[in-house]
Amino acid sequence: MAGTRLACAADPARSRGRRLSEPAAPTRSEFQRDRDRIIHSTAFRRLVYKTQVFLNHEGDLFRTRLTHSLEVAQLGRSIARSLGLDEDLVEAVALAHDLGHTPFGHAGQDVLDDCMRGHGGFEHNLQSLRVVDSLEQRYPDFDGLNLCFETREGILKHCSKRHAELIEAGEPGGIAARFLYGGQPSLEAQLCNLADEVAYNAHDVDDGVRSGLIELEQLLEVELVREHWRSALVDHPTLGGKRLLFETIRRMLSAQVYDIIDATRAALAEASPADADAVRRCEKPLVHFSAAMRTASAALKRFLFANLYRHPQVQATRARAEEVLRDLFAAYSADATQLPADFADRPDRERACADYIAGMTDRFAIREHRRLTGKSLF
């Protein structure tokens, strides 16, 4: 059931605007326009061939960055509708939050950060902002997508102090100010952060079992899984196999969604922020789990880290992925002619290499590595 629009929700009619002013769209709100620009971007299309946990070639049914982003958007919109938040802004942030992710998931980020040591480092959240602020080249009057402040604020959900200071210098009081002076982003941005966590915990359970790297018996060690597995069997005593797993995950998702709605309503009632800027002045996020659900979610996350992300098969794949990206960075740094012209001509050679590699899909990175080194690691 949809809730009444909150006075402290983001309002596209009162947006802080775009870095370059544009006439209003006749048929869409500012946040709808941002969502549409994100969907039509090159970086968004590339997400279909970027790793979540399992590489693209390891199976057609495993999640990718694209399907993950769609799941985050679905969960986010459902919760936003109940709370009375702006669904379009939630969707825009959800669809854009992983645009800066490298090929091969977090392994790629770690490699590029190491390669860029001494050249500003590499953060995937900051890279997502770079994509929408400058790297996309689709419009005649500006680089990037020229998104609204509120969308950009939501995309930059993490930021080191060093990078926040650089952003703040060029955009005083802007999207990075909260990382230096305290405060929170909009309720919609807070919601996307939590929907991201809910989505990847649930789909990594699904993908982990589907891959054979996790057994259902192992998962039942986790209270959140065990509780909903038991409740599914109470209602469906003969259920088994994939249907039982899917029903367990569905119930887990529903429980977390309802918990977020109830806990957030209570927090909003207590804080009573008058508008979106009052939300930003709060010391702590207002969109959150209850204490009990936070504990249960953290336990599931620890289980996945120990049993899936550190599984020997996943680690072996990660090692090969790291070698691919290190070799690519070394090759491009040594010989700029191997880069496309618009990257080769840039004066900031190392950052150009990082931008080019970060934009690659898994399979393109593997193909480029084979071309440049003659090695076939996958």
Image (cartoon, rainbow, N blue to C red):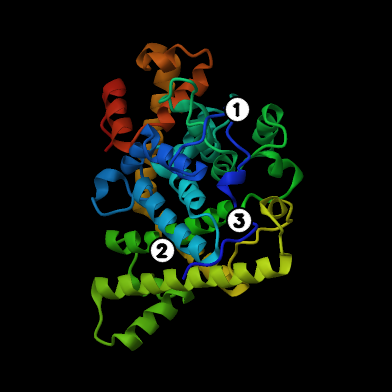
Count of numbered marks? 3
Nearer the observer, disc 3 or disc 1? Answer: 3
Q: Is residue 132 visible?
A: yes
Disc 1 on helix, strand or loop? loop
Q: Amino acid at mark 2?
A: Ala
Mark 2 crowdedness (10 Å alpha carbons): few <14, some 14-19, many ≥20: many
**What is the C-alpha distance between the residues marked 3 and 2?**
27 Å
Image location (x, y in percent) of residue 370: 27, 27
Image location (x, y in percent) of residue 356: 42, 26
Residue at 74% in and 48% down: 182
Q: Is residue 335 visible?
A: no
Q: In the image as oriented, which residue stretches furthest toward the front? A: 26
Residue at 72% in and 54% down: 278
Asked whether the residues under the numbered discs 1 and 2 touch, taking CB atoms below 8 Å apart as contact, a structural biologist would say no
Q: Amino acid at mark 3?
A: Ala
Q: Residue 189 vs residue 232: left or right?
A: right
Disc 3 on helix, strand or loop? loop
Nearer the observer, disc 3 or disc 2? Answer: 3
Disc 2 on helix, strand or loop? helix
Residue 202 disc label: 2
Instruction: Name the residue nearer the viewer: 292 or 89.
Output: 89
The residue to which callout 3 is attached is 9
Dot 3 or dot 2, earlier in sequence = 3
Image location (x, y in percent) of residue 82: 51, 67
Instruction: Name the residue nearer the viewer: 254 or 226.
Output: 254
The residue to which callout 1 is attached is 120
Q: Amino acid at mark 1?
A: Gly
Residue at 58% in and 70% down: 295
Instruction: Name the residue nearer the viewer: 184 or 125.
Output: 184
Q: Is residue 358 above or below residue 264?
A: above
Mark 1 crowdedness (10 Å alpha carbons): few <14, some 14-19, many ≥20: few
**What is the C-alpha distance between the residues marked 3 and 1?**
35 Å
